[in-house]
Amino acid sequence: MTAAPAHTAVGPDVHTRVQHFYAHQMQALDGGRFTDYAATFTEDGTFQHSPGATPARGRDGIVAELVEFHKRFDGDPVQRRHWFNHIALEPQSDGSLRSTVYALVVTVRPGGKPEIAPSCVVHDVLVVTDESVQTRSRLVTHDQMA
Amino acid sequence: MTAAPAHTAVGPDVHTRVQHFYAHQMQALDGGRFTDYAATFTEDGTFQHSPGATPARGRDGIVAELVEFHKRFDGDPVQRRHWFNHIALEPQSDGSLRSTVYALVVTVRPGGKPEIAPSCVVHDVLVVTDESVQTRSRLVTHDQMA
Amino acid sequence: MTAAPAHTAVGPDVHTRVQHFYAHQMQALDGGRFTDYAATFTEDGTFQHSPGATPARGRDGIVAELVEFHKRFDGDPVQRRHWFNHIALEPQSDGSLRSTVYALVVTVRPGGKPEIAPSCVVHDVLVVTDESVQTRSRLVTHDQMA
């Protein structure tokens, strides 16, 4: 190999900070704290939960999208948990990071067993500064739609 | 936002040390090495595997609790694996860390397919020093009991 | 305890570099980029996907093994994703690291729901330098064969 291996292009501190960022971000989403979730995006951030969807733009737009999406669970005491795995980071020429992450959605209802579906891939562009990590764009692809 | 984002309050080295701690801790549990598992708690550590249970106290108490719990698997060649995801850390005023972690229990029997249940949340208080990480208290909540 | 806890024997930077290495390595495998996957092994690396299998040796041997294995999916538009959890590292006397990792294989077909099986344990020996991480040997055990 002449090229440096992909896993060496982003340092360990940044990788861990991204992991910890995702932990708080996704616990906010699954906890129904949509404003906290939206605040993890840049001000002009975009969020597209499937390839065919119109991307939500900006934090207010992301909150509105989540409120709309979750209407399907009105009166349904469901707990959803978004699991992430294998966070692969690649630096972009503008200083941002491309982040490609496996995701599984775990859904549980009272007295029930977890349903684990769908299997997705999260395609993020992240803005990492000394102070924080933010998502600039998120597109989620679904394996069963391939 | 005026407050610093939640993911910035604990540094990356501590986050990674906690991840590695959990890897060894949970492989000890799933390997049936209960004394090793109990040794990952502080001497006065508590372990409560569900909200209704009486917490086990101290390392001997934790071992006794695990021996008792695993009697249900006597003669049953089961392999259980506790998966963790999204380790969200928050500093506490006494210097300890609150750790909130998603968990799924994978259960496999010879010739069988994995059963993945229940979906839980682990609520830990961790004591982190320069030398090591230890669990001071662990409460596990179950999503299907919500 | 007189011995240092297991999670303290390998520093946080190395642990994170291994995580990031695995993210890229397994996304290469699941993306069908077998040459990229093989390049994550040392030149004399070995890969044994189950205890009874003859280990593939060397990068060309690993590619050949993967091509052979994936013939079962010819004409089957399957997406497989290998999830990892609880990466426990232990230093070896020769400077390499033993890495013991939980793994689940997620399989999705168009329009279908994920199947999550088998549950495995990955037993790696890793060579970590300042520049990169490589797998020197990999043996995968399967929980349902226990």
Image (spheres, coloured by chain):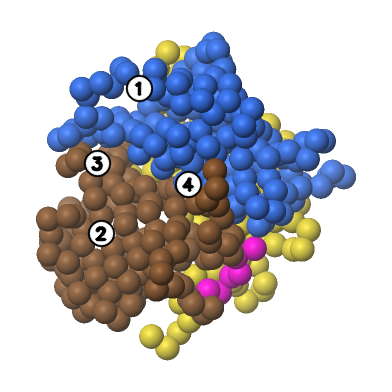
Chain colours: A blue, B brown, C yellow
Task: Residue at 77%, 63% (x, y): give it.
Answer: C130
Circle 4 packing at 10 Å, graded few (<14), some (14-19), many (20+), is many
Query: What's the chain of the residue with tag 3?
Result: B
Name the amino acid, label 2.
Leu
The residue pinned by badge 4 equals A23
Task: Residue at 58%, 62% (x, y): give it.
Answer: B11
- Residue A39 appears at what percent x and percent y? 53, 37
- Residue B62 appears at what percent x and percent y? 22, 72
Going by the image, does A129 lie left or right of C125?
right
In the picture as drawn, the residue positioned furthest to the bottom comes out as C2
- Residue A5 appears at what percent x and percent y? 76, 46
Q: Secondary structure at mark 4?
A: helix
| Residue B143 appears anywhere in the view | yes
Calculate the distance from the C-alpha at mark 4 to the C-alpha at mark 1: 21 Å
**Discs 1 and 3 lie in a common subunit:** no
Calculate the distance from the C-alpha at mark 1 to the C-alpha at mark 3: 18 Å
Task: Residue at 62%, 32% (x, y): give it.
Answer: A43
Q: Which mark is residue B143?
A: 3
Give the mark nearer the N terminus: 4 vs 1. Answer: 4
Going by the image, does A89 lie left or right of A115?
right
The residue pinned by badge 1 equals A70
Nearer the observer: mark 4 or 1; the answer is 1
Calculate the distance from the C-alpha at mark 4 to the C-alpha at mark 3: 18 Å
Name the amino acid, label 1.
His
**Disc 4 vs disc 1: Cβ atoms closer than 8 Å?**
no
Nearer the observer: mark 1 or 3; the answer is 1
The residue pinned by badge 2 equals B139
Q: Quadrant of residue C107?
A: top left
Pick the front one: B30 or A97? A97
Pick the front one: A3 or B136? B136
Region in magenta:
C8-13
The stretch drawn in magenta includes residue B97: no
